[in-house]
Amino acid sequence: MLSTKFHTRISRRTALVVASMSVLAAVAGATPSVATAVSDSSGAARPAVAQTQNPGSASTAPNQRVKAANGVTYQYRRFGHPSAGSVPLVFLQHFRGTLDSWDPKLIDTIAAKREVILVDNVGVGGSTGTTASTVQQMALDAIDFIDALKLPRYDVFGFSLGGEVAQEVALRRPWQVRRVVLAGTGPQGGVDQRATDPNILQRTLKDNPGPEDYLFLFFKNTATSQAAGKEFLQRLGQRTTGHDAPSNLATRDRQLTAWSEWGIPDKSKLIRLKALFQPVLVADGESDMLMPAKNSHLLAKHLPNAQLHIYPDAGHGFLYQYAVKFGTEVNTFLDR
């Protein structure tokens, strides 16, 4: 069992991280902007185009901010080990998730081989503005952030809600997006993406969900998966300073509206995937209750250049249950 002290810490830090059943995607382009990135720790300005000099880790990388052309100031973390010829990997987070919601073990495994950029989209965590209530606008907001950093070429990693954003960013910016990783997500108009189970909805929409809710929603009800989930929650406590702000309830509700619209079954929407020609890694846990794995199979079927990996004995949080294994798989895919 989780100790009272651990329960309190996790409840505060990950309470509003719990439900990644949503979908963030986007449909339109954005105009590049000139911006300045600022580190919280120093307050000193530096050109946004400068490549990170901080090898860092997910637990120590400083929060940085950049103001984009849309007037929003985005909070993000940028670190890792870029190599010659590599491009940055931009991470797009799940429903109610913030910078602090990423598993340090997964991120550091990936960052050992490349530069990574974690971002709070508009109205999420430490970023300003009002969260969009459509997946399409969420993606435009993500593009505004990317333009603010002046990234000419990049890869995209989208988890759950962020996976829908990643699809739309790749569709709208094919000349910039090189490769795509889609984890625990689904296509617009897919199947069973609008949760109706009362137990799932009740836990997902709690004002203050706790670790027991996270374990239920993200990990399979087996001893091995639940044990992996508890280890993951412990890892979230590795960061001791510079915590992100939690997402608020207004953000939750607007994200939920966007997810609900995205999840309306509509087979005609699947044809859009034919235009996403970049290489795509699609992955999920075989027992994902938030975004059933049948949606990953749909993605792999309709995307012209996709590979599919379904992880056993795992749910929505498969990428945290298999943090090193999946992180290594992501690096191998991106290095091809």
Image (spheres, rainbow, N blue to C red):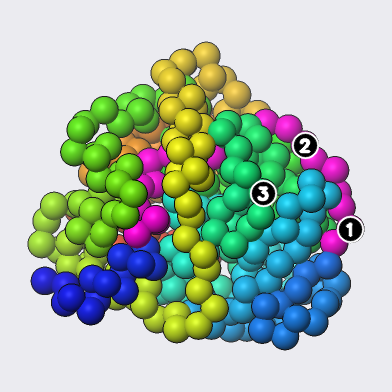
Task: Assess disc 3: are there few (<14), some (14-19) or many (≥20) residues with their C-alpha within 10 Å of its C-alpha.
Answer: some
Seen at 73% across and 32% down, the residue is: 28
Amino acid identity at mark 3:
Gly
Residue pointed to by mark 3: 129
Q: Quadrant of the C terminus?
A: bottom right
Amino acid identity at mark 2:
Gly
In the rendered image, which quarter is residue 4 located in? bottom left
Amino acid identity at mark 1:
Val
Residue pointed to by mark 2: 29
The magenta segment: 15-35
Q: Relative to 258, does residue 163 appear above or below in the rendering?
A: below
In the rendered image, which quarter is residue 43 located in? bottom right
Out of 119 and 329, give the one closest to the viewer.
119
Residue 75 shown left or right of residue 203 in the figure? right
SS category of the residue bearing label 1: loop
Percent from the top left, x then y, of residue 31?
A: 85, 43
**Membership of 24 in magenta stretch:** yes
Estimate the spatial distance between the alpha carbons at disc 1 and disc 3, rounded to whole Å.
19 Å
Q: Relative to 64, does residue 330 appear above or below in the rendering?
A: above
Residue ranking furthest to the right: 34
Seen at 70% across and 40% down, the residue is: 140
Q: Nearer the viewer, mark 1 or mark 3?
A: 3
Seen at 37% across and 30% down, the residue is: 193
Percent from the top left, x then y, of residue 329?
A: 45, 61
Residue pointed to by mark 1: 34
In the rendered image, which quarter is residue 200 located in? top left
Estimate the spatial distance between the alpha carbons at disc 3 and disc 2, rounded to whole Å.
19 Å
SS category of the residue bearing label 3: loop
Q: Earlier in the sequence, mark 3 or mark 2?
A: 2
Q: Earlier in the sequence, mark 1 or mark 3?
A: 1
